[in-house]
Image (spheres, grey):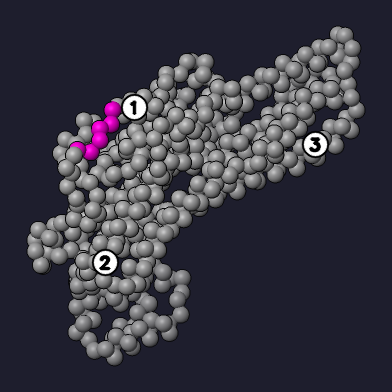
Amino acid sequence: MSPSSTHSAPPNGAKKGPHLGVQAASTGASSRTHSPHPSFKDHSRVPSNNLAREYFVGPRDLEKHSKLPYFLRMSGSITPRMIVPILFVAGWSTMITCISYFVHALVVDSLLLTVLGIVIGLAISFRTSSAYERYIEGRKYWSLCSQASRDLARHIWIHANERHDVDAELGKQDLLAKITALNLIEAFAVALKHKLQFEPFTHYDDLEHLIAHLHTFAHDAYDPVIATPKKKTPWKTAGEYLGLSMAASNPRKIIKQSKKNLGNLPLEVLGYLSAYVESIIQNETFTCGPIQAMAMGNIAQLNEVMTGTERVLNTPLPVAYSIAISQITWIYVLALPFQLYDTLKWVTIPGCIVGAYIILGISAIGREIENPFGNDTNDLPMDSFCKQIQAEIGIITSKPQFKPSDFIQKEENKPLFELSHNAWNSKSTDDIRISLRARSDRPLKRDDMDAPEKQIGMV
């Protein structure tokens, strides 16, 4: 769904939910319609041409398998963004070579190539290592987000009681409140993704259905005029695909144009989650003290994820380093034909092209992964991370609260292979302990890996 669709505010007189104490949207609260499977991809950024989408628009699909060797792959390669710089270097080296051959030899001592090469190597190494460190740090924070989301969802689903035995309607309200809370866990991840990509509103397909019932600053600040992307000219689109800085738009443009306070949507979602946990503690459906502490700790971990990713996003490499590294890299590349012509003659042209591809390519990789939360081909696949969290929450909620009696006393349960639980239940405690001792005393051999019944001394 394109961002141009209008976004309606929650209706007046909205009722409060059983636990969250927030505005709940009634039927027909929004004039927007949603597909049954909300998309995690903003397709307005993706060109219709599949080939261009694969090479220029990211992040790259990690599930896609390629049998090509790495040196022949284009998807995920920096080569498309190197087309313009390489063409410029080819033209420059051709001009210097022609002048040197037909007019006057423009040559300098190759010693300069060696001295500058050491400096360039150190500069590019620093740039690449700094960028990769930021990339890995961003991935670690998303791993922590997945872990905290799983733990919090499991704690709420398993340990928050549903009062069906007190009243059927009350138990149903408890169940719906738990589902709402787990949706908020998913909403946090999706809202964080949009925040890191400078998308500050709530009208996105993968987010609106999760938080339409919440009163947030981003919801109130929504402006369809600002949120609707302007149609790009073919030249601007081509320039963005080719990595030309002159064609790149300011990613914070929407935030700067907003006339209202946009708030901090992930933080607000965490506030609603905390309110829910507090409510189930107060109504004594979430009574285990250690689990209460762990649930609040998981919310604190999600806040740590938000803070850490914001730090990575808003603390790039100091601009002085970026400017200096870019300048000395281009000085080195532009000086190559003057140093190579005396030895290579016409081979100077392909030699400069190869040298420029190596030096500028490695530097371009550093620039691309410096912000791991963007839409370049090598950026983190945050859509996939959000889908994974959604799927795992779905797995947790697919079954009602587990009770030990539901799985321990089943005939298929074989505590000590190969007798079932019921068979072992008919034996004495001493017999069970003798079998446990026999299992630990018997050395494990390679053949036993395929025959687990040999590991148990049957009584």
Q: Please say whether residue 183 is visible from this viewpoint.
A: yes
**Dominant secondary structure, magenta:** loop
Label 3, label 1: how far apart the Cα atoms are: 52 Å
Circle 1: residue type: Pro
Foreground of the two, 49 or 125? 125
117 lies left or right of 167:
right
Query: How many angstroms separate mark 2 from mark 1 (CA)?
Result: 40 Å
With respect to residue 45, does 187 lie above or below? Answer: below
Q: Is residue 135 visible?
A: no
Say whether disc 2 or disc 1 marks the residue closer to the N-terminus.
1
Q: Quadrant of the C terminus?
A: bottom left
The numbered mark, 3 or 1, whose residue comes first in the sequence reads 3
Question: Which residue is label 2 attached to?
Answer: 281
Q: Amino acid at mark 3?
A: Gly
Secondary structure under the numbered disc 1 in the rendered image: helix
The part of the chain drawn in magenta is 6-11
**Above-or-below relation of 348 to 426:** above
Foreground mark, 3 or 1, reads 1
- At mark 2, the secondary structure is helix
Q: Quadrant of residue 384?
A: top left
| Residue at image mark 3 | 117
Q: Is residue 353 left or right of residue 435?
A: right
- Image quadrant where one finds the N terminus: top left
Magenta stretch encompasses residue 281: no
The residue shown at (36%, 53%) is 270
Residue identified by numbered label 1? 224
Work out whether 317 lies above or below 171. above
